[in-house]
Image (spheres, grey):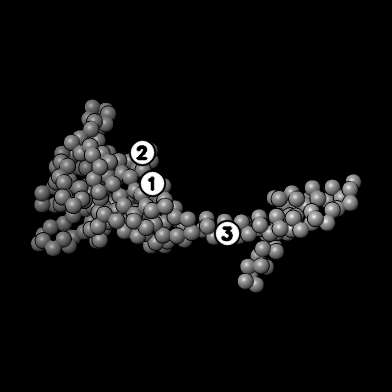
Amino acid sequence: MRDYWRAVREHAWETFWGAGVLGIVFTAYTLYYPPARPYIPWAVAWAILVAGYFIWRADHVRLLPKMTLGPLDTALYARTGVANQKRRYVQVIVACATEGSLEICRGQLLRISEWVGGKWEATHISETLDLLWSYVDEPTVTVEHGAPRRLDLLFVENTSRDIVLWTRMRIKLASASAPTASFKFDVRVAAKDCPPKYISIKVTFGDHWDDLTAEIIGNEP
């Protein structure tokens, strides 16, 4: 309590002569009229009230959940539990930018488009799918400050070379055998008490099974 009232005193003094402008108005008033005693307690109470608000707001902003998306990671995993099988993943790094935590954080794939004839064309994946988190294999997790999580988008295996979405059903999108094929993945990530964020990810596949590049090309819903 002693630290609290010390902070209130400091903020009240700053408010009285600074942002509140009350001290300037009060001083100018006394140049022409004698200060009325009933006004003084009200001025002090107002300054303490505003000071308490600024003290509360600092902690409120510090603990308010705020999400950041990116960069992308195209990790290569050689151990999948199957002999001679390897996978390359495309993952989105999700982090909490404040000291609060992102509770019930979930990622969703909204749609997939393919680059055909100089424009993006819709594929058969045109409805919302819940993505899973790396190693957790669950649709929701808690992301804490200083401990980012990886949201799995897709993977490609060296055996089948199929592009597989990281969802409950492991949906096959296409084969990565065709070089220079490009797809756009529209992703939405949301959490409790935090506005959702949207990104569009472009993935281009090369000649080899693990030859792919991923980049964020937009952040519109």
User: From the viewer's perspective, is the residue at label 1 or at label 3 nearer?
Assistant: 3
- Tag shown at residue 221: 2
Q: Amino acid at mark 1?
A: Pro
Asked where in the image residue 43 lies, by quadrant, the reply is bottom right
Q: Residues within 10 Å of mark 2 (few under 14, many from 20)?
A: few
Q: Image point 65% across, 65% down: which residue?
A: 7
In front of the other: 124 or 196: 196
Q: Residues within 10 Å of mark 1 (few under 14, many from 20)?
A: some
Question: Where residue 92 appears, x then y in whole percent?
Answer: 32, 51
Asked where in the image residue 102 lies, by quadrant, the reply is bottom left
Q: Image point 21% across, 51% down: which residue?
A: 166
Q: Amino acid at mark 3?
A: Trp
Reading the image, the residue beneath label 3 is 56
Q: Amino acid at mark 2?
A: Pro
Give the CA distance from mark 3 to mark 2: 33 Å
User: Is 204 above or below relative to 100?
Assistant: above
User: Is 214 above or below relative to 59?
Assistant: above
Q: Are marks 2 and 1 in contact (CB under 8 Å)?
A: yes
User: From the viewer's perspective, is the residue at label 3 or at label 2 nearer?
Assistant: 3
Query: In the rendered view of the protein, which quadrant contains the C terminus?
Result: top left
Query: In the rendered view of the protein, which quadrant contains the N terminus?
Result: bottom right
Q: The residue tagged with tag 3: helix, strand or loop?
A: helix
The furthest residue to the bottom: 2
Reading the image, the residue beneath label 1 is 196
Question: Where residue 78 appears, x then y in whole percent?
Answer: 18, 60
Total count of labels: 3
Give the CA distance from mark 1 to mark 3: 25 Å
Q: The residue tagged with tag 1: helix, strand or loop?
A: strand
- Tag shown at residue 60: none
In this picture, residue 40 sits left or right of residue 65: right
